[in-house]
Image (cartoon, grey):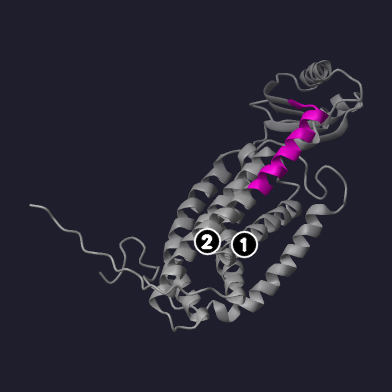
Amino acid sequence: MKYWPLIKVLPVRTHFRFVRLARVFSTLSVLAIAGSLFLALYPFKLPCGGLACGIDFAGGTVLELSTAPKAVDTSKVHEALDGMRLGDLVVQGGGSPSAAIIRFQAPPGADITKTVAAAQGRLTQALGTVKFTRTDVVGPKVSGELLSSGLIGLGLAILLMLLYIWFRFELQFGLGAVAALFHDVFLTFGMMALLKNYIEFDLRAVAAILTIIGYSMNDTVVVFDRFRENLRKYKRMPLGDVIDMSINEMLTRTIITSMTAVLALVALAVFGGPSLFGLSVILLFGIAIGTYSSIYIAAPVILLWGVKRADEEAEPLKPATVRR
């Protein structure tokens, strides 16, 4: 067959020279990492720096309400809660005109349960018929534990990935994969800082970043596996050419795999509501940046470090035999 069915726009084999532009894109990536770290950390204050700290890590209360079929009057929401001395009061839309999400912190020393009940009573008086669809309360001690646990989880995931790649391939492969993972995580934090009015840093964001780490590592392992196979086949071919060949051989497969995930995540971002919007955007960004890092972060590290070429040739696959 000349073309693949249903995906005729994608060539079966590409011949891009990725290594030729590795230095340029690696430099841009370093600059992007520096900018992302600055955006994520500035202003340098706990617990989340430049990120929009969610209730999981900042502590406080989230009320999600609906006044369907009529629209929510946000000015009345502010008027109803202004006199309660609530800290960090934020009122935002909930995906439809009749929905709203309210975030606040109880006054120091106040009983959280009574404060939430009083806030619900005032909102009911101000807005009329109100249905509270979500009520989350997180204390400051719990939020601190969740933040430290989330960061430890991210660190352990990257460490275990390094050990896995080191065990399966060589140390330089592991360093290249971990460099790509740090690149993906830092740029994701930078994206979240840029879109902090729309995306919060909470447990869902941590779950999304862990998913990005797994996706990026899977893509990197596939490329590394083909790279190692080609090193055995072409012992005299320059290392840069072997890298280009390996990436080109897996490029179409990577695009198809990424597009299936992108289609599902776009639908989730559009129809999943505000609670899943941030998760979907983080994953969409992570898939794109994870594919990029496998090409222009992980591979250049191997090119700079060099590899030890195996003595044995690649073993050809034997044709299957049919028993009669």
81 versus 29 height, above or below: above
> What percent of the width, then of the height, locates residue 99?
68, 31
The residue that appears at 45% across and 67% down in the rendered structure is 251
User: Of callouts 2 and 1, which one flags the residue occurring earlier in the amino acid sequence?
Assistant: 1
In this figure, which residue is indicated by the disc labeled 1? 180
Badge 1 local density, few (<14 within 10 Å), some, or many (20+)?
Answer: many
Going by the numbered disc 1, the residue's amino acid type is Ala
- Where the N terminus falls, by quadrant? bottom left
Q: In the picture, residue 171 is in which quadrant? A: bottom right
Circle 2 SS class: helix
Regarding residue 109, the answer to whether it shows in the image is yes
- The residue to which callout 2 is attached is 220
**Residue 281 x %, y %:** 62, 49
Q: Which range of residues does the magenta coloring cover?
A: 137-156
> How far across and down, in percent of the image, does residue 324 sit?
7, 52
Whether 98 is drawn above or below 301: the answer is above
Numbered disc 1: secondary structure: helix
Image position of 124 with respect to 241: above or below = above
Q: Nearer the viewer, residue 242 or 7?
A: 242
Judged by its main secondary structure, the magenta piece is helix
**From this viewpoint, which residue is outermost toward the left?**
324
Q: Is residue 264 left or right of residue 78?
A: left
Of 88 and 16, nearer the camera is 16
